[in-house]
């Protein structure tokens, strides 16, 4: 996003929402607690709502440190929004453009272009597609999915995927196994950029304005932000890769969600060093990250930690023990 767009979101959060921007595991920014009209008009004025009919399906991840992926992402977005029928994609359908880093390729996208390799549901199809045809290939798969999906929401729910590849331009090779790689580094990156993370993915409007003042920014699916500049002063943003809370995520919890059994964000913030863990207030487990993590689910008078009930006052101890295993 541009500096002006980040400022516009910060202003909208203050004027219309709960005063914060909430980062998601799909690389999105949420404004919550919106009770007054005018948000759509503000987003459109900032260039953040190019196609209202397709807003629900503009789900694209791109490697933040790949110039190629960052160039392809707007082209894919434009092609997606230009196809009226693709507005019918399920809202959970996810595209990814990975420049070869292996970062977003491991984030559970339905279809991913990984530096030439075409992946479906994270698995290599053996089809090799040039960067020139990457957007065309992803759009072709999305169209095919619409035709055969039935009631399926994700590629993983299909009985087979061969039909998705019909007509995709490319060369067939033996499929490979690609290892998932870490996401955006936290701290200084290259000459002048920095990776930052707001605690538990909640970015205050003041922090958003500090980022906007520093430079353009890329929001990642790891609830972090690549800032093309260095925010000045003590912003409260995490810039130390050794910070224990970097591995902890949480749904919005109580009181922001009526389904939540607990204020999971407050409980998560009180926990010290833990393994990678996700706190959820109900069985929906909103915001659950991809990859291995400890499942911390709110329950009566405590939490289910990977399925085992733990009283609330013992949660920190149990998680610390898991971190040592």
Image: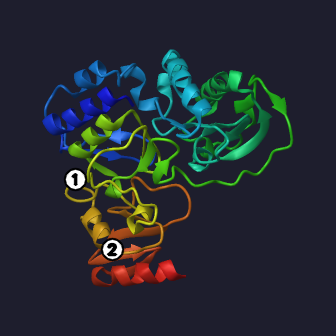
Quadrant of res 127:
top right
Image spot of residue 166 (x, y percent): 75, 26
Q: Residue at x 51, y 30 (%)?
A: 89
Quarter of the rendering containing residue 32: top left
Check the picture and name the quadrant holding the C terminus: bottom right
Position of residue 292 in the picture relative to residue 48 (left or right)? right
User: Residue sitting at 37 percent across and 84 percent down?
Assistant: 317
Q: Is residue 35 left or right of residue 105?
A: left
In the rendering, at what x and y percent does residue 319 appear?
42, 78
Q: Which residue is mark 2?
A: 271
Circles 1, 2 touching at the beta carbon (< 8 Å): no
| Residue 74 relative to residue 158: left or right | left
Q: Which residue is mark 1?
A: 256
CA separation in Å, label 1 and label 2: 20 Å
At a point 46% along the width and 30% down the height, the residue shown is 57
Classify 20 as above or below 277.
above
Q: Residue furthest front?
A: 191
Q: Nearer the viewer, residue 152 or 305?
A: 305
| Callout 1 crowding tier (Cα within 10 Å): few <14, some 14–19, many ≥20 | few
Disc 1 element: loop
Query: x and y percent of residue 323 in the render?
Result: 49, 78
């Amino acid at each position: 996003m541009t500096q002006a767009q980040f400022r516009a979101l910060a202003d909208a959060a203050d004027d219309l929402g709960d005063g914060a921007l909430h980062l998601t595991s799909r690389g999105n920014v949420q404004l919550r607690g919106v009770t007054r009209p005018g948000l759509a008009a503000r987003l459109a004025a900032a260039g953040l709502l190019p196609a209202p009919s397709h807003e629900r399906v503009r789900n694209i991840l791109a490697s933040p440190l790949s110039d190629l992926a960052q160039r392809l992402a707007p082209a894919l977005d434009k092609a997606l929004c230009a196809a009226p029928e693709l507005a019918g994609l399920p809202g959970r359908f996810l595209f990814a453009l990975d420049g070869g880093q292996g970062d977003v390729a491991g984030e559970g996208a339905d279809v991913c272009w990984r530096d030439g390799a075409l992946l479906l549901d994270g698995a290599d199809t053996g089809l090799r597609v040039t960067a020139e045809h990457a957007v065309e290939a992803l759009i072709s798969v999305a169209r095919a999915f619409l035709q055969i999906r039935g009631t399926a929401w994700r590629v993983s729910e299909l009985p087979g995927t061969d039909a998705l590849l019909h007509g995709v331009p490319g060369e067939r090779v033996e499929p490979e196994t690609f290892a998932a790689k870490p996401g955006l580094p936290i701290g200084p990156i290259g000459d002048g950029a920095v990776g930052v993370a707001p605690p538990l993915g909640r970015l205050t409007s003041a922090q958003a304005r500090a980022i906007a003042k520093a430079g353009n920014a890329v929001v990642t699916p790891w609830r972090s932000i690549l800032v093309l500049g260095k925010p000045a002063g003590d912003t409260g943003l995490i810039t130390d890769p050794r910070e224990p809370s970097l591995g902890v995520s949480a749904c919005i919890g109580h009181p922001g969600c009526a389904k939540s059994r607990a204020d999971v964000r407050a409980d998560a913030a009180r926990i010290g060093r833990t393994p990678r863990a996700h706190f959820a207030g109900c069985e929906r487990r909103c915001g659950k990250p991809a990859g291995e993590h400890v499942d911390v689910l709110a329950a009566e008078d405590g939490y289910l930690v990977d399925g085992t009930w733990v009283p609330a006052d013992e949660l920190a101890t149990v998680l610390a023990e898991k971190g040592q295993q």
